[in-house]
Image (cartoon, coloured by chain):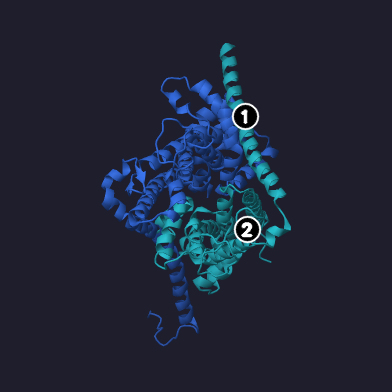
Amino acid sequence: MTALDTTGLAPPRGFRAQEAADQAFRGVTFFAAAIVLLTLVGILAALAWGSVPAFRAFHFTFFIRQVWNPVTVQFGALAPIYGTLVTSAIALLLGVPVSFGIAIFLTELAPEWMRRPIGTAIELLAAIPSIIYGMWGLFVFAPYFANHLEPWMTAHLGGIPFVGALFRGPPLGIGMLTAGVILAVMIVPFISAIMRDVFLTVPAVMRESAFSIGATTSEVVWNIVLPYTRTSVIGAVMLGLGRALGETMAVTFVIGNAHKIHASLFMPGATISSTIANEFTEAVGDVYYSSLIALGLTLFIVTVVVLGLAKLMLRRLDYRLR
Amino acid sequence: MTRYRRRQFANALTLGASVVVTALGIVILLSILTTLVTYGISALTPALFTEMTPPPGSAGGLLNAIVGSLLITGIAIAIGAPVGILAGTFLAEYGSGSRFTDITRFVSDILLSAPSILIGLFVFEVAVVTVGHFSAWAGALALAIIAVPVVLRTTEDMLRLVPNDLREAAAALGAPRWKVVVMICFRAVRAGIVTGVLLAFARISGETAPLLFTALNNQFWSTNLNAPMANLPVVIFQFAMSPYDDWRRLAWAGALLTTAAILGLSILARALLSTPKDTRS
């Protein structure tokens, strides 16, 4: 037994070329994947670099000051941060129950022939650009809101202690509450589409065993479907939150861009993204620029954390779908 | 019996609420669409496609903005689609199970939903500050960054659906890996990859925020990629926020055009994916 002697054998014709092509192709695809990774790092680095002058000027008081004055070059992020958090909170408060209802309707209630059209319609609505929602908000919703809903709220909710202050104020139509409502409308298609997919991952056998011992549909939803999909449902909500936090155009149309924190939700406000959209091209001076970029950096870090958590919570869904 | 009644009542309440909110959602969404169509159709004139964006207070069209948008999104797709496809290929074909792959996929998914205005800020710092002026190139770059994760995701998902038998059969015939990927896998999922590109195209067609401080806007006809260029989303934004009726009408027309294009692309993408998989003939 001797080992096969291959020293005299040349590799097949063209083998080396193919091997080189193989290496090259792999290298190119790797490079493309690395670009994606570097983009995120690049965004972080560019925003961090750009916000150095602002942090040098204001240190961490940047985050806790309400002043936003280009004339005296004093900037603080409190009002836009407050606006971002409040509008997103309103969006979730209104949007999540509605999305949940739609998802239940699509998975438990709707007759078979309705599921696909409505499901597709909802997914298509998620594709409509935010500027359209913004225009609808400004020209259709805001006037209706100012003429009908806001006076009603002031009359009926304004008297409640503590909470009432939120609903007292001039019915302008544009303001924090309007922005929150528009955001809710925007994230509903998004969240409900994911929730529906999540609900569909519940094994039929679990649902059916519950029905077989006499559970009602609502008991199946609350006691079987929801506990089983809890993590993914929270993930879907966080994904919606990530969208709401960073949504720019729709909010810019209806929020009124005012850097002041008011108790009333009817008053104009500002979010981080609307501030950047409104003021960036007009900003003069290093510190003004830099403060806007520092706002962007804040938003970026917050959304990356929120979206990252959402992804981790939805990971289970990804595995199951494949 | 009362306990039974109570359960029935709870059931009716939950289901009733779910029907009501679904109806509410549909009403709101229909309101958006009807608003768009009614305002948009009345502004839809031939002049839209033959005249430039007007100065305030006079009639005009959107020709420069339409052409600008097509140019910018076209370039963005030309940059973004290859990167996305190749990156997706790496994740699906070469990097399975490695940490690099997991992190890249994670990052890509985050970029998919990251606020697009921040991508505008990033490109502003990278491609506007360094060059010294706004340009269509910068706008295209910003949109390309948004397109990449969309294409990447679809490509990877599609390639993972290719049965390993196909790869092994090709490899057994002596095909090198790159040929297996390009000639076997890509062909098998051609429709899927095209779908991803179409979806990316739809996604970036309506993006406004990243163009605000990259491509900026231009009131005049310009195909100079090295200068600010008119584009539909920014024109819509500027005109809709203006107090002039002529401008607002144009904004609605532009909004209708953009939405129609996006919905058309999305529906086309869906139709492509749902056709039976006999595209190999």
B56 above or below A191? below
Image quadrant of residue A220?
A: top right
Q: x, y percentage for residue B245?
A: 64, 48
| Badge 1 amino acid | Val
At numbered mark 2, what does the secondary structure look like: helix, strand or loop? loop
Residue at the extreme front of the image, as rendered = B57
Query: In the visual, does A201 lie left or right of A8?
Result: right
Instruction: State the count of labels.
Output: 2
Q: x, y percentage for residue B6?
A: 57, 16
| Badge 2 amino acid | Pro
* Residue found 39% across the figure and 67% down from its top: B130
The chain identifier of the residue carrying mark 1 reads: B
At numbered mark 1, what does the secondary structure look like: helix, strand or loop? helix
Rounded to the nearest angstrom, the CA distance separating label 2 from label 1 is 45 Å
The residue under label 2 is B54
Q: x, y percentage for residue A18?
A: 49, 78
A71 above or below B48? above
Chain B, chosen colour in render: cyan
The residue under label 1 is B20
Q: Is residue A191 visible?
A: no
Chain A, chosen colour in render: blue
Q: x, y percentage for residue A103?
A: 57, 36
